[in-house]
Amino acid sequence: MVASQDTSAFGELVRRHQSQVRNFLRKLTRDESLADDLAQDCFMHAWDKIHAYSGRGTFIGWVLKIAYTTFLQSWRKSGRYQEVLRELEQRGAAVADDCVTESDELSDLDKFLSVLGEQERVIMIYSYACGLSHREISDATDLPAGTVKSIIFRAKVKIRNEFEIENHQHG
């Protein structure tokens, strides 16, 4: 139905998933209007590529992969990509130096994400901000589910170490 470019079916998919896509992009960009623009671009790309969606994996995983690619293309074209990465690294260092204060009104998630590499950051956003399963993240990133699980584990360790958070595991 969707593969034949049924506009009403695609419209329903957009309605079901647009808030998840927007939230993902808002976490990546920290700019609501840019995220909304990128979400619109993402769904236009998804419409153009709908014939390539095989039905393997989840639709949200597939569309979030397009969203992430749209985000990367936008930032690389704008020249702000490296600047944003440097800003996040600096912010991470500042937060690590003084993690008691709420400098720049960063949320806990933003503070934690600032100490991670790009791939770790994206996967943690997929997992914790978007609530995707390891399988859905695997679909969105083309990484094996085991690799996704390992990246999440390593990112948690990095965050715990950076912010001196004790790990209270049961059993």
Image (tube, helix red, strand yellow):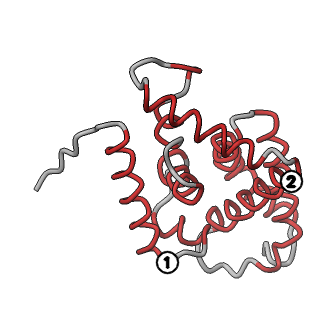
x 57%, y 60%: residue? 119
Question: Which residue is more in the foreground, 109 or 135?
Answer: 109
Residue contact between numbered discs 1 and 2, judged by CB atoms under 8 Å = no
Closer to the eye: label 1 or 2: 1
Instruction: Work out whether residue 69 or residue 13 is closer to the camera in this orientation and state it.
Output: 69
Residue of label 2: 41
Rounded to the nearest angstrom, the CA distance separating label 1 from label 2 is 27 Å
Q: Is residue 147 left or right of residue 24?
A: left
What's the residue type where badge 2 is placed? Asp
Q: Quadrant of residue 152?
A: bottom left
Q: Is mark 1 on a helix, strand or loop?
A: loop
What residue is rendered at 54% in x and 54% in y? 117
Checking the image for residue 46, the label placed there is: none
Frontmost residue, 120 versus 48: 120
Residue at 84%, 49% in the rendered image: 40
**Residue 39 percent coordinates (x, y):** 79, 49
